[in-house]
Image: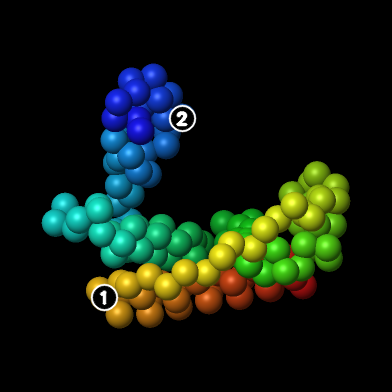
C-alpha cells in the first residue's frame, strides 16, 4: 500500500527496496521481465525470480565459495538438526529453528510451461547448493 502512503514509499526507497510496489525498479539481469511483460501476471514475477537467482548462481568461484543458499522446505523439515550447522556458518552460534513452519502448497497456473520448467531447474540447483553446503 505504498502508493497511498508517502512515508512508506520513501522509507522503502531509502532502504533500497525497489523489487516491487509503487516504486518498483526491476532488476536488469539477463532474462528479467521486460517493459512489455505484465507485472500483474505470475509469469512476470517468475521471470524476475529466475533472472535474479540465475545471476546469483553464475557468480565467480571466489563469490560462490561464500554464498549460502537456504532451502526453506528442507530447513523446516530438518530444523532440529540444522540450527547448529547454520549458526556455525554465519557465526552466531546454534540457532533455534523450531518456530519454522513449512508453507502450504498451492497449485498455480503459469501460461508458459517452459518458464515454469526453467524455474524448477533453477530451484533444483539452489537446493543442491544448500545440500552441498548446509546439509553436509
Quadrant where the C terminus is found in the figure: bottom right
Location of residue 122 in the rendering, given as x and y in whole percent from the top left corner = 46, 72
The residue that mark 1 highlights is 112
Q: Nearer the viewer, mark 2 or mark 1?
A: 1
For the question of whether residue 78 can be seen, the reply is: yes
Question: Can you tell which quarter of the image residue 82 is in?
Answer: bottom right
In front of the other: 92 or 6: 6
Q: In this view, which residue lies farthest toward the top?
A: 7
Question: Can you tell which quarter of the image residue 114 is in?
Answer: bottom left
* Residue at image point 77% right, 62% down: 79
Rendered position, 112 above or below 75: below
The residue carrying pointer 2 sits among few (fewer than 14), some (14 to 19) or many (20 or more) residues within 10 Å by Cα, namely few
C-alpha separation, residue under disc 2 versus residue under disc 1: 33 Å
* Residue at image point 39% right, 65% down: 50
The residue that mark 2 highlights is 15
In front of the other: 28 or 82: 82
Location of residue 6 in the rendering, given as x and y in whole percent from the top left corner = 33, 20
Location of residue 59 in the rendering, given as x and y in whole percent from the top left corner = 49, 61
Rendered position, 82 above or below 4: below
Q: Which of the two labelled residues, at mark 2 and mark 1, occupies the earlier sequence position?
A: 2
Q: Is residue 81 left or right of residue 60?
A: right
Rendered position, 121 above or below 21: below
**Decide: marks 2, 1 in contact (CB < 8 A)?**
no
Quadrant where the N terminus is found in the figure: top left
- SS for tag 2? helix
Amino acid at each position: 500500500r505504498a502508493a497511498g502512503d508517502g512515508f512508506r514509499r520513501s522509507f522503502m526507497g531509502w532502504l533500497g527496496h525497489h523489487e516491487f510496489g509503487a516504486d518498483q525498479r526491476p532488476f536488469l539481469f539477463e532474462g528479467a521481465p521486460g517493459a512489455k511483460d505484465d507485472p500483474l501476471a505470475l509469469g512476470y514475477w517468475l521471470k524476475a525470480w529466475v533472472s535474479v537467482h540465475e545471476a546469483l548462481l553464475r557468480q565467480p568461484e571466489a563469490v560462490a565459495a561464500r554464498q549460502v543458499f537456504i532451502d526453506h522446505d528442507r530447513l523446516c523439515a530438518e530444523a532440529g538438526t540444522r540450527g547448529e550447522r547454520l549458526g556455525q556458518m554465519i557465526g552466531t552460534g546454534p540457532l533455534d529453528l523450531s518456530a519454522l513452519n513449512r508453507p502450504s502448497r498451492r497449485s498455480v497456473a503459469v501460461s508458459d510451461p517452459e518458464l515454469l520448467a526453467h524455474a524448477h531447474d533453477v530451484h533444483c540447483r539452489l537446493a543442491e547448493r544448500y545440500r552441498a553446503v548446509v546439509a553436509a
